[in-house]
Image: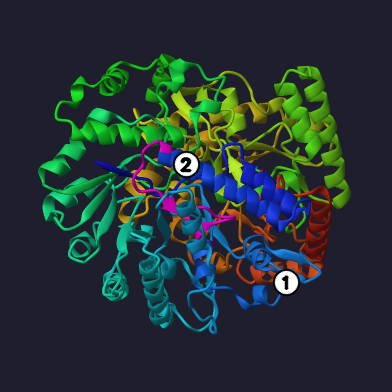
Amino acid sequence: MKTSVIGFPRIGTLRELKFASEKYFRKEISEEQLKETAKELRKTHWNMQKNAGIDFISSNDFSFYDTVLDTAVLLNIIPKRYKELDLSEIDTYFAMARGYQGEHGDVKALAMKKWFNTNYHYIVPETEDDTKIKLSGDKLWNEYAEADELGIKTKPMLTGAYTMLKLCRYTGNKSEKDYVGDIIAAYKELLQTCGKKQIAWVQFDEPALVLDMNDSDKALFHQIYDELLAVETDTKVLLQTYFGDIRDIYEEVIKMPFAGIGLDFIEGKQTCDLVSKYGFPKDKVLFAGVVNGKNIWKNHYDKTLKVLSGLREKGIDTVISTSCSLLHVPYTLENEEKLSKEYTAYFSFAKEKLVELSELGKLADSKNYAEYEIFEKNHKLFSGSRDCTNKDVRNRLSKVCESDYVRLPKRSERQKIQKEEFKLPKFPTTTIGSFPQTKDVKANRSAFKRGEKTEQEYVDFNKKKIAECVKWQEEIGIDVLVHGEYERNDMVEYFGESLGGFLFTQKAWVQSYGTRCVKPPIIWGDVYRNKPITVEWSVYAQSLTKKIMKGMLTGPVTILNWSFPREDISIKDSISQIALAIRDEVLDLEANGIKVIQIDEAALREKLPLRKTDWYKEYLDFAIPAFRLTHSGVKPETQIHTHMCYSEFTDIIPAIDDMDADVITFEASRSDLLILDSLRENNFETEVGPGVYDIHSPRVPSVEEITNVLKIMLTKIDSDKLWVNPDCGLKTRGMKESDASLRNMVCAAKKIREKA
Ligand code: GLN
Ligand code: ZN
């Protein structure tokens, strides 16, 4: 059987692309130098796949920022305000991705959203009424030619027309249907050009097919592909889906003349059943996504081979594929020097998954695969048991009862008590937690990790930073302070490191957005807290000020969602174990005099099942109670905050209110403020701090800008419930811009108070 990879990570094993891009942004290297790095990376990645024996290798999966943005540019979906900056092609691109503030003007970045149910973010394409969708740009062809020169025939990949239309934000009067004609014309031309260039296969990524589809969605899909598949071209079209099954349209899709269809057998719960029930035509190739592109556990060959032989028995022409792009897993285990073999034996990152694909290819072709050594080795791993159970944890969890999920008295009572207790001004100002992680902060941490600094020296340095941070906030005039999170590399990794049951990698970076990467921990076993984690830092910070110091924790749902989860116990059990560990920390903070505690659930929305019907029973019904379990034990006057990145929770507002936090802050500046209307309509009870400016971009918002945002917010939110804060933590920002932005924010809050 042949093998296929949907997409490969592009940031570089050692994050070469990140560092080159950042140097370019700082004007330390030229455009040519940046492009040279990119070219080297592409070459390395293609060769890696070729050497592993992969048959279908993608091109155009490389991106300087995001592949959806690349497709938007390819389709000329570039809002006027960016064109008008009159920058070079690449700088216009980066202006859309990151915003621009300089000699050429001042524009915000395009919106950014979570990519389906992953921790990757894509740039939301934006059409205006005079946007003319047409084929423009030559990235796709150039990268194909580049691989060709290396002797590798690739399948160019890009976001498909249907998913593009679904992801676009239509800012003018026109809507989706007004662009259908032009987008079809553009993809037609693309197919013709692919044909002329003798490109054998093109891969259209259509993950939007795994979402709920209604009749008009299906009609749109038909309209697009009935026309595209009628184009006379020698290029074959692979319809690539992932992140679920395509139950709403499977029956129709298999009747359409696609040369290949890619289905997800890992997350697609009904994929196998769909194939059994409706069959799969003999004249098409099924790209079977059986190697998990999202998790890092080794593939269970026996299970996978059974699926593959089932397909073969049905006479289906099958290619073994990853379940989605490998973008979501780290590069390779080869750089992990500290993890012992006992652990790594169970893991497989992108490069190792290439080996799995080709081994599966070999095994699938042989009748007696059980006799092969590669099979035998894999089989042993899965028939043995891992050392990962903790009896105390299991015991404690079994004793948790209904009342442990309920905090008393009810929130409206607590809000009164807390107003009395804190006597904060109207529209209190606060930040989300982290302050800039400047070079010295990172240097301190790495020196400590390398053993070049003693623990005392490390702690002293952080304490000095905390003191500066507290003084800085007092001077700016912020009401509820934070300690700055200098001791944290990452909001999840930091907690994972202090909890039992987690494993850590050294170089296992995964791209989150643009140049930002994260290193998710691996949940290896049952989770528990050994000793207090944040208490000392928070208590120290509180000792420096009369103002209120907010304790800062990461919530159980986010810890789980930003880790690589176990596959041997349920997500529900894993989340509950983590919730109990965080509960211990919450109670310790309270006992040590911390009166406001923020429990971040930055990623709560992230793992919401893609289909609405699954939302509650497969996720919210245990995720929300798990959050309550973390804070239900505190006193009425202790104020619990939570924070969520991204405000896309319009459709689950009751569930968010059900977390029973006293205050929630969330991202709002890079999305429209429609969420606020919905909060009102749902009688949302939690106090709210919708971010008043975007921290993902270095631009400084003016006082007027923030005042205006606050004015709009006040038309939608009760004045005794509004908090004033940035979108998210400031760790990726510089000192200067943070200082200017926060001063403007406080100034805007004061102005609004005068008027109220
Ligand atoms: N408290 C964290 C910080 O400020 C929250 C980060 C996040 O929401 N992503 O960095
Ligand atoms: Zn955030």
- Residue ID for mark 2: 47
- The question of residue 2 being in magenta is answered with no
- Residue 364, how many percent across, how many down? 21, 34
Separation (CA) of disc 1 from disc 2? 53 Å
41 vs 442: above or below: below
Magenta segment, principal secondary structure? Answer: loop
SS at mark 1?
Answer: helix
545 vs 126: above or below: above
SS at mark 2?
Answer: helix
Badge 1 or badge 2: first in the primary sequence: 2
Mark 1 vs mark 2, foreground winner is 2
Position of 22 with respect to 298 (left or right) is right
- Can you tell which mark lies on residue 499? none
Q: Residues within 10 Å of mark 1 (few under 14, many from 20)?
A: some
Residue at 61 percent of width and 19 percent of height: 531
**Displayed quadrant of residue 251:** bottom left
- Residue ID for mark 1: 708
| Residue 501 seen by the camera | yes
Part of the protein shown in magenta: 51-69
Kind of residue indicated by mark 1:
Asn
Instruction: Say which quadrant the C terminus sits in.
Output: bottom right
| Residue 419 seen by the camera | no
- The question of residue 61 being in magenta is answered with yes
Position of 177 with respect to 541 (left or right) is left
